[in-house]
Amino acid sequence: MSPAQQTILAAGEASEHRPLIISLFAVFVLATLVITVWAGRQTRDAADFYAGGRQFTGFQNGLAVSGDYMSAASFLGIAGAIALFGYDGFLYSIGFLVAWLVALLLVAEPLRNSGRYTMGDVLAYRMRQRPVRTAAGTSTIVVSIFYLLAQMAGAGVLVSLLLGITSDGGKIGIVALVGVLMIVYVTIGGMKGTTWVQMVKAVLLMAGALLLTFLVLLKFDFNISDLLGSAAEQSGKGAAFLEPGLKYGATGTTKLDFLSLGIALVLGTAGLPHILIRFYTVPTAKAARKSVIWAIGLIGAFYLMTLALGFGAAALIKPDEIIASNKAGNTAAPLLALHLGGTDSNWGAILLASISAVAFATILAVVAGLTLASSSSFAHDIYANVIKKGQADEKQEINAARWATVGIGAVSIVLGALARDLNVAGLVALAFAVAASANLPTILYSLFWKRFTTQGALWSIYGGLVAAVGLVLFSPVVSGKETSMFPDVDFHWFPLENPGLISIPVGFLLGWLGTLLSKEQPDAGKYAELEVRSLTGTGAH
Amino acid sequence: MATDAPPPSKEQHRLPSAEEFAEVQQSAEFTELRRSFRSFAFPLTIAFVAWYLLYVLLSNYAGDFMGTKVFGNINVALVLGLAQFVTTFLIAWWYARHAAAQLDPKAEAIKSRMEGAE
């Protein structure tokens, strides 16, 4: 048992209130399973399975997009980072939010107008289908698995801590349970079920955050300056706690790392496949635009509340206690709930259990979205269009998607069990870097650059992918540091933890270079079709 | 605000031919739509990415300036961070307005003509 878990157990909360926490988890799981079965019975054709029948309204999809996006990293990770590093934790949320403007202005509507089910639909539109779809499917699966790992690791940490499960076997059991649930959600409920689970989760998460924010502000008579002052004082770091630099300001290298992270965050969102496929669930580009506007409002409001949660946790709980509970600060929000309710009252326990259930719901909704994105891309891009060369019927395609879900679920259970001790927010930031390097350049070139060719697309996707994943492999994330995946060996030579600073320009550059050097002529007719469709919605599915 | 999405349409529209797409792409009407979209979205994207990067760079390399107290315990860093939220909300609103007034009518006209033409 780690000292962290001892602390929380010693406080008596986790063990004593375990039945309450388990019942709330069970209620959520049961409710979502009912939704899933109900949605499954309405899932008949491919458009239902992949795109929820394209029947959701802009508002509904905005909720679901928020539910898909605000992951364990947003809720637990950012609140924890603010609680420990003050202002530097806040920097994450700004990148995560501003990034939505890229999706709004450049990607959401053209994608909705010109694609059917996957990101690959748009990337391959005017290119040679098989190589480009293979590339798009590969990068979709890699990005989603990085992201899945983060969520699985988060689930393991959170649930085992809260339920007082300390054995490795128990933690692996939790990861396996999350994996099995996500397989059930996606294979049975498809996009329709996943969307409803994400909407429910978004409402719960907003309500939970709103309640905690209100209680924190109440403690400080709604005086934000006082809240910040107490947080700075309690943290033991004084005014520096409210200024940039505590986490990233140490050396020139950490500053570059922060710049790299910032670029990856702002350019990554619009390249995340599980976010992109959400735009296919609404009937028109206009509704896709409304979804993003709603998502920006909801996500922005949520990140503003994480400020209150993070600084509130810093002000009300000793930093030692937060660190003792989880080194990365991932349990700051649940601990804050306990303190706000009163550590020795039932209210504290109830609040802790509710917030933990919300966090669990958050993780389940996000893993379902990720699994759906990767299995859709496998079935639609790789199986139907590459292996079967477009000859598969809808039934075969959906069956392939269901089997792919089981496969991806199994892979992420194994990897998630291995990655159970890794830093959650860090892993998510890597997924953003890979998405920004491998996907975003090709999406933008495809939509807006007449000359772009198949070779450009392939160089950009594979080049960005290899650069991003390769640099991570030789970064301190994997080896050479105490916090690395393999702390005992050291083969790192790339100094930054986030590869975006190098790999994103590489992705854009290779797409440009590959195009200039390619012998084939771009298909002008296909580009005319794509351009007219993407801007007007003519012939949209 | 967004509950008024049209009911799902399952009916099949006529898909225009390659020649029609090429013709429309060259038309003055479509050129105007493209210009109206690009001249709004592209400069604005460059502007907000630059503004965001400026903020990241200030956080990195201008610690003293960012730490300046504005009032109470609120410093420049926090004000600029919140300003990023405000500009994000404003840009989203501004784009939605531009799209509804300038882009949607043009796009709709082209779409209905192409899908309706026999």
Image (cartoon, coloured by chain):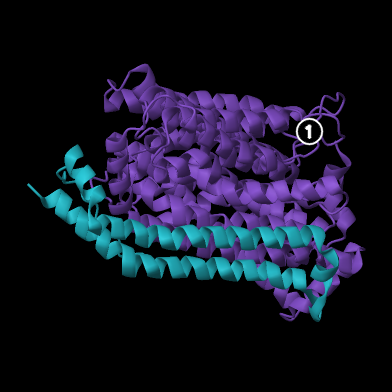
Chain colours: A purple, B cyan
Q: Nearer the viewer, residue A194 or B46?
A: B46
The residue under the point 66% across, 44% down is A429
The residue under the point 60% across, 62% down is A302
Q: Position of residue A191 (x, y in %)?
A: 40, 41
Note whether residue A165 is visible.
yes
Q: Nearer the viewer, residue A541 or B32?
A: B32
Instruction: Give left or right: position of B85 versus A425.
Output: left
Determine the residue located farthest toward the left in the rendered image: B118
Q: Quadrant of residue B15?
A: top left
Disc 1 chain ID: A
Note whether residue A401 is visible.
no
Residue B93 vertical placement versus B19 (above, below): below
- Which three-letter amino acid code belongs to the residue tagged 1? Phe
Instruction: Give left or right: position of A111 versus A258.
Output: left
The residue beneath circle 1 is A494
Q: Nearer the viewer, residue B79 or B7?
A: B79
Residue A96 vertical placement versus A366 (above, below): below
Position of the N terminus of chain A, as image quadrant, is top right
Please, what secondary structure does the residue beneath circle 1 have?
Answer: loop
Instruction: Give left or right: position of A219 versus A462.
Output: right
Label 1 crowd bin: few (<14), some (14–19), many (20+), radius 10 Å: some
Residue A153 vertical placement versus B113 (above, below): above
Q: Position of residue A211 (x, y in %)?
A: 63, 67
Q: Position of residue A517 (x, y in %)?
A: 49, 28
